[in-house]
Image (cartoon, grey):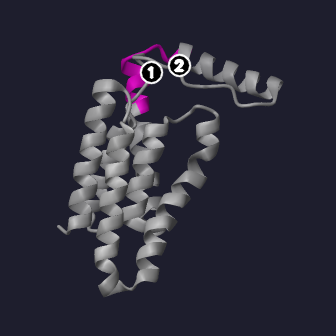
Amino acid sequence: MDFSMLFCIIFTMGAVFFDCKWEKVPNLWILTGWQISMTEHLCRQVAQGLGEAVFRFWGGSLLVLFLFFPLFLGKMIGTGDIKVFAVLGSVFGPGKILGCIVSAFLLGALESVFFLFFRCDWRQRFLYFLQYVQRACTERSLPPYLVPGKRPENIHFTIPILGSVLLLYLGGRG
């Protein structure tokens, strides 16, 4: 296991801890992650060349911010989750972070289906979703979707993100 993958696993495990304990990932954790990623890229630049290191760092981070901006506007994903993905994107680069995002959303969907049927009333949640879509169409805007707080339907998305990072490592792509 190289340093980058070890860092991604430890960083994401820390994010899961903070998310589960306080329902937020502190900005200091995010900034520390970006600093470690940037330092690692700068140390590697001698071997790879500065252009590739800069592209991976900024390309991965900015791609995440671009992809998640619409979900952020609709309050469908927390800023902590976006920032965790952005730090991982700075390590993985644009290509690998896309795979990480896709697998995290698939794992998150599995977790959501489990919670939908075993932790809350699925009919009530489906009705809430239909009412949300109707309200969004009527108002022609994206009202907040997520009801904040410790609710049975709210998942800690950092857990599927960690699962995705582990899948990348186990699959040999990290």
Please state the extent of the stretch shown in magenta in the rendering.
112-123
The amino acid on which the numbered mark 1 sits, given as a three-letter code, is Glu
Q: Is residue 11 left or right of residue 62?
A: left
Q: Is residue 131 left or right of residue 49?
A: right
Name the residue that disc number 1 marks.
Answer: 153
Main secondary-structure element of the magenta-colored stretch: helix
Name the residue that disc number 2 marks.
Answer: 147
Q: Does the magenta stretch include residue 63?
A: no
The amino acid on which the numbered mark 2 sits, given as a three-letter code, is Val
Near-viewer residue (17 or 108): 17
Residue at (31%, 67%) from the top-left corner?
Answer: 39
Q: Does the magenta stretch include residue 119?
A: yes
Q: In this view, does 11 lie to the left or right of 86?
A: left
**Which quarter shows the N terminus?**
bottom left
**Which quarter shows the C terminus?**
bottom left
Eyeballing the image, is 122 above or below 101?
above
Tell me whether the residue at label 1 lies in contact with that at label 2, contact meaning CB atoms closer than 8 angstroms: yes
Q: Callout 1: 10 Å neighbours few (<14), some, many (20+)?
A: some
State the image coordinates of residue 109 (x, y, percent, origin top left): 45, 38
Q: Is mark 2 on a helix, strand or loop?
A: loop
Q: Callout 2: 10 Å neighbours few (<14), some, many (20+)?
A: few
Outermost residue toward the left? Answer: 1
State the image coordinates of residue 152 (x, y, percent, origin top left): 40, 17
State the image coordinates of residue 160 (x, y, percent, origin top left): 35, 42
Mark 1 vs mark 2: give the one in front.
Answer: 2
Asked if one can make out residue 164 in the rendered structure from this viewpoint, the answer is no
Quadrant in which residue 34 is drawn: bottom left
Residue at (43%, 30%) from the top-left corner?
Answer: 113
Eyeballing the image, is 16 above or below 49?
above
Eyeballing the image, is 85 above or below 39?
above
